[in-house]
Amino acid sequence: MKITGKFDVALEPMETFAKGVEGSNLGRMSISKVFHGELSADSKGEMLNVMTSIKGSAGYVAIEQVVGSVSGEQGSFVLQHYGIMSGGTDRLTLEVVPDSGTGELVGLTGKMAIRIENGQHYYDFEYTKV
């Protein structure tokens, strides 16, 4: 199955416990999202990121727990993020953590892509359920 929709996101800075060295700026953020459409859910998570001294080069990892419904089935699951930006070109992977589905979403696997168009965030979620 593939579903697409919009989402709203809020990022809030959090205390960072590690310090960057020589040109690396480490950060930590809380993530809060509301998904609309066939993925009707709220999510909470945390992100660790780094900005380098080279403009357009950065990285982040995040864990996000999503609670709501996928195509009408209720439950929760966890998304793991891995993002790299090099020279302004980004590569982003969001994947359902194996065996993280609960309720009617037990057995959920999949990948999500994020698009930003005219300031609006969109998701493309390709998933299967065993």
Image (cartoon, grey):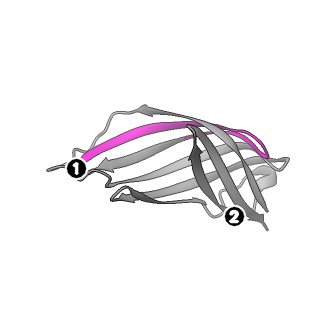
At a point 60% along the width and 42% down the height, the residue shown is 121
- Most extreme residue toward the right, as rendered? 72
At a point 73% along the width and 51% down the height, the residue shown is 4
Question: Horizontally, is 112 left or right of 46 in the view?
Answer: right
- Most extreme residue toward the front, as rendered? 118
1 versus 71 height, above or below: below
At a point 63% along the width and 57% down the height, the residue shown is 112
18 versus 87 height, above or below: above
Secondary structure category for the residue under label 1: loop
Report if residue 35 lies within the magenta region. Answer: yes
Quadrant placement of the C terminus: bottom right
Looking at the rendered structure, the kind of residue marked 2 is Thr
Question: Horizontally, is 97 left or right of 127 in the view?
Answer: left
For label 1, the residue is 24
Secondary structure category for the residue under label 2: strand
Question: Horizontally, is 60 left or right of 101 in the view?
Answer: left
For label 2, the residue is 109
Q: Mark 1 and mark 2 in contact (Cβ < 8 Å)?
A: no
Q: Which residues are magenta?
A: 25-44
Task: Identify which residue, 65 or 7, lies in the foreground.
Answer: 7
Q: Can you tell which quarter of the image residue 119 is in?
A: top right
Find residue 36 and report its horizontal and vertical position in percent: 73, 39
Main secondary structure of the magenta stretch: strand
